[in-house]
Image: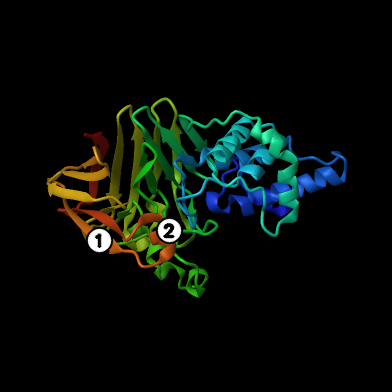
Amino acid sequence: VDKFINYTHSDGACEEGPSYWGHAAGKMYDYLQLLYDGTGGKISLFDQPIIKNMGEYIARSYVGNGWVVNFADASAKGGGDAPIIFRYGKAVGSDVMMQYAAYLNSLSTRKSLSSGRDMFRTLQSLLYAKEMGEVEPSYQSPAYTWYPETEFCYMTNKAGFFLAAKGGYNNESHNHNDVGSFILYSDSIPVFIDVGVGTYTRQTFSKERYKIWTMQSDYHNLPQINGFSQQYGNTYKADNFEFDIRRMSLSMNIAPAYSREAQIQKWIRTYQLKKSELIIKEKFQLNAAHLPNRIHFLTWNDVDDSTPGKLTVQVKQNEKVCLSYNPRLFCCEVEKITLQDPRLSNIWGERLYRISLKAINKELNGHYVYKIFKIK
């Protein structure tokens, strides 16, 4: 347990995503509660900020309607187990966790307190059930959540956008090659997505892991630079990861996430969430320009690319999200991806779409801007 806590950054974020929180921070909490109870409270880590941060991650990563921020191998669905979230929140004095747990519990039609074969969790849930039922259910996404060490950042605006973006490095727990990627939700509906991971097989945890398409940067919301995708390993990472709270702006250099052969001097990606739109900027310098850059976006909604410079994604019956770009710089391609793995299709349906903005020219230096906003 001590080694696990020391491995985790002090900001408390779970690299593996919300799906794994119950087996990561959640299991740690079980052990700390046993330690507390077994010593009559003489040994307690519940007053340590890192322990509280590790707990509140599960609440802050919830988007709404069952959707969560799902970087790495995490599923995009599932808000966590209400009883353990409540007990953890009570132990560390987190109203955020206790109210969130009560909120999840209020949504559940099946009020089971069983944790399957985990008898300790089941008995603990029984002890706290009455108290959880008396807490006012409440949850609202904060304006922002900033994890400076793990390099996650969430931002929301009054227009209903929830943006999650990451830096990090390409050897995190349950890693995907996704440094610099983002996920965008509109009124708790996914628009630009992280597909997650398919059914686990031998290949998933072998040297062949990055031959699986869901693990590759080309199937995340990221650029393919000079014909090159991101690489796997500790040294492939973001640097200069900076968040400006006043401007609600996140920036990072993702050049180190690509191999030297890509000939990237720097590639600064910036996300700015304004009152009614998301602005994404790329500023880059290359040492050589071999192939046109491609900027990828992944969505599960129907896409209309009939108008150059304006691409629309159907979100609801009466609402679309528009991605605008400079048609003098890019041509647009849309590829349909058929999902045959039930672990993916159960979440996203039968197909996804990968949007590729292909640069018309090969340039050593450049500046790209895309704007994302709602239209009726």
Residue at the image position 37 percent from the left and 41 percent from the top = 185
Mark 1 residue type = Lys
Q: How did the renderer colour the structure?
A: rainbow
Q: Is residue 222 shown above or below 63?
A: below
Q: Exactly how many numbered labels are in the figure?
A: 2
Give residue 64's quadrant in the image.
top left
Q: Position of residue 16 (x, y in %)?
A: 54, 53
* Tag 1 near tag 2, CB within 8 Å: no
Q: Report whether residue 192 is seen.
A: yes
Q: In the rendered view, does 294 fall on the left or right side of 151? A: left
Q: Quadrant of residue 65?
A: top left
Three-letter code, disc 2:
Asn
Q: Which residue is mark 2?
A: 177
Q: Secondary structure at mark 1?
A: strand
Which residue is located at x 45 percent, y 38 percent?
A: 154
From what the image shows, is residue 46 above or below residue 293?
Answer: above
- Residue 320 at x, y = what percent? 24, 40
Q: Can see residue 231?
A: no
Circle 2 crowding by C-alpha within 10 Å: few under 14, some 14–19, many from 20: many
Q: Which residue is mark 1?
A: 336
Residue furthest top as drawn:
246
Where residue 357 appears, as percent x and y from the top left, is 21, 52
Of residues 363 and 198, the one nearer the viewer is: 198
Q: Cα distance, mark 1 to mark 2?
A: 21 Å
Q: Secondary structure at mark 2?
A: loop
- Indicate which disc, 1 or 2, sits on the residue closer to the N terminus: 2
